[in-house]
Every structure is written in structure tokens, then in C-alpha cells.
């Protein structure tokens, strides 16, 4: 696992370096929205370090207001992710710089610090989270949850393959949040949006867990990365399962001997906040 982490780290560093070079080569200025994303990630890193859950709510609200509704969610980081493969398919190496820069910075932060983007910055996750009502929450049966979670990897494969082959994006045609942020869309897209938003009241972040290709990619990065959630003081752990039950993403198993599915951990801190003995870290 350590060798895999080193390989992934070196690859991400090279990717980041190439994206900076390609961006400079193209002569294009870094758009303000990129700096907003980078700034929110910096705030998220500080907030996670000091366990400031209130700051997480502020970064999500700011992202939803500015990146979501003000900029109409366009282009979102998922769109940038797709454009990387569009330009790869076309062989446009200089144009790849800016979208790759955004994806590479986000991936580097996730690799080093955990999935702060999904949990703290993504406006799509924010909208679902603010709709979620804890007192109405439905916990998806673990077997069904594990099966549904596989679907987003199929979406990820499509989002990578389609732009490479056909040199065009596809996810923007099925992304329900495009309709939410622009207040327009086809009947099919609006119908999908209604399903996502309605289910978000009862199920925590259903789109993130079961459909989002960027979440699938960042989950893989998180699995290979340095982030580690563990019981820091086993002697204080009462093995009551509060942390497991409090995880809204259903990413935890086995209290005491804690098992974390890093692909779905979004660093929301709900487990550590719920722990009565404060022994998670």
C-alpha cells in the first residue's frame, strides 16, 4: 500500500507540474472561479485541522451561493474533468492546462488531506446536504448501499471514455444540477433533478454516493492518499458504535477496530463530533 501511495503521489505531483506548465504555455489567465475553489479548499484544510464544523457549513454555503447559483454552476469541476479527456482525445496539449490545473489541485488536496472537496467545497453536495432532514433520515440497507455505490464507477468510466472517443462532453447532458442552477432543462433532466432533490431530504447526498463521477475519481484518490481516520486512543473507546451510526455516508464499520471506506469518506467530521470520548482522529 505504501508503494502504491508513493506512485500515486509522484504521478499527482507530475500532473500538477504539467498542468502549471501547460497553463503558462497557453497564456490564458487563471479564472477567478478557480481561485475561489482553491481558497475554499484552503479554508476547508484549516477548518478540518481545528475541527470547526461551523466553518464547513460556511464553505458549503459560500460555494452553493457563488459557484452554484451566481455562476450557474458552469463550468463545474466535473466539467473540467471531462474537458481534460476531450483535449487528450484531440491531442490539444496546451489547451489542457487550465482544466487540468483545477482537477490536479483538487486531487492533490484530497491525496494529502482527505476528501475536503466533496465534503466542504462542492456546491452539488451542499445543495443535497442543506435539503437533508436528519429526523426524516432513511438509512439505506448496507447490502443495497454497497451495490448502488458501484454505479458511480460506471458513470466515471463513461465520463472518461466518451470524451476521449467522441471529443465532446456527455455528463453535462445528464447532470441534474445543471437544471437546478440554470432554472431550465429538458423534462427528463428536470425529472431527474426532482428525484435527486426529493430523495436528498431522506437520504444523505444520494447523487454523491451513487452517481457522481468526480466523487468516484476523488474517492479513488483518497483511497491511495495519506488521509487516515482511526481510533487514536483505543483505551477510551467504549465500542458503542456511535461513530458508525453517525456517519451519514455509511462509510464506517466495526467500532473499536474501525474500518473506514475512504472512497466514500468526505471528511465531514460527523463521526468525531458524535464520539462521546473524543477518541477519533
Image (cartoon, rainbow, N blue to C red):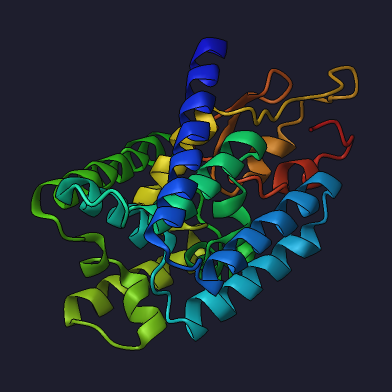
Residue at left offset 53%, top offset 34%: 222
Closer-to-camera residue (205/229): 229
The relative height of residue 196 versus residue 16 in the rendered view (above or below) is below
- From the viewer's perspective, is 198 left or right of 5? left
Quarter location, residue 64: bottom right
| Res. 208 visible in picture | no
Quarter location, residue 74: bottom left
Q: Point out residue 28 in the picture as x, y percentages from the top left corner.
A: 42, 66
Residue at left offset 80%, top offset 47%: 273
Q: Point out residue 274 in the picture as x, y percentages from the top left corner.
A: 78, 45
**Count of numbered badges drawn on the protein:** 0
Instruction: Give the position of the C terminus as an image quadrant.
Output: top right
Q: Point out residue 79 in the picture as x, y percentages from the top left corner.
A: 34, 62
Closer-to-camera residue (211/170): 170
Residue reaching furthest left?
Answer: 166
Residue reaching furthest bottom?
Answer: 183
The relative height of residue 111 versus residue 106 in the rendered view (above or below) is above
Residue at left offset 88%, top offset 36%: 278
| Res. 61 visible in picture | yes
The relative height of residue 107 versus residue 221 in the rendered view (above or below) is below
Closer-to-camera residue (194/11): 11
Q: Point out residue 201 in the picture as x, y percentages from the top left corner.
A: 50, 68
- From the viewer's perspective, is 270 left or right of 158? right
Amino acid at each position: 500500500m505504501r508503494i502504491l501511495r508513493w506512485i500515486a503521489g509522484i504521478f499527482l505531483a507530475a500532473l500538477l507540474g504539467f498542468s502549471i506548465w501547460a497553463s503558462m504555455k497557453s497564456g490564458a489567465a487563471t479564472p477567478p472561479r478557480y481561485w475561489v475553489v482553491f481558497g475554499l479548499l484552503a479554508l476547508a484544510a484549516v477548518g478540518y485541522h481545528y475541527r470547526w464544523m461551523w466553518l464547513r457549513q460556511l464553505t458549503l454555503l459560500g460555494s452553493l451561493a457563488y459557484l452554484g447559483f451566481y455562476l450557474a454552476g458552469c463550468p463545474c469541476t466535473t466539467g473540467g474533468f471531462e474537458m481534460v479527456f476531450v483535449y487528450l482525445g484531440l491531442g490539444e496539449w496546451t489547451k489542457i492546462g487550465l482544466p487540468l490545473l483545477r482537477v490536479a489541485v483538487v486531487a492533490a488536496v484530497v491525496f494529502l488531506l482527505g476528501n475536503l472537496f466533496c465534503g466542504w467545497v462542492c456546491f452539488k453536495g451542499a445543495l443535497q446536504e442543506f435539503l437533508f432532514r436528519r429526523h426524516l433520515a432513511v438509512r439505506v440497507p448496507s447490502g443495497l448501499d454497497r451495490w448502488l455505490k458501484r454505479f458511480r464507477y460506471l458513470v466515471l468510466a463513461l465520463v472518461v471514455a466518451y470524451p476521449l472517443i467522441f471529443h465532446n462532453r456527455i455528463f453535462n447532458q445528464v447532470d441534474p444540477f445543471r437544471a437546478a442552477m440554470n432554472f431550465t432543462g429538458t423534462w427528463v433532466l428536470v425529472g431527474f433533478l426532482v428525484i435527486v432533490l426529493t430523495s436528498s431530504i431522506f437520504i444523505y447526498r444520494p447523487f454523491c454516493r451513487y452517481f457522481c463521477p468526480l466523487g468516484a475519481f476523488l474517492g479513488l484518490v483518497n483511497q491511495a492518499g495519506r488521509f487516515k481516520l482511526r481510533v487514536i486512543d483505543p483505551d477510551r473507546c467504549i465500542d458503542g458504535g456511535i461513530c458508525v451510526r453517525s456517519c451519514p455516508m455509511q462509510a464506517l464499520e466495526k467500532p473499536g477496530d474501525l474500518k473506514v471506506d475512504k472512497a466514500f469518506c468526505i471528511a465531514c467530521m460527523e463521526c468525531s463530533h458524535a464520539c462521546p470520548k473524543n477518541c477519533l482522529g
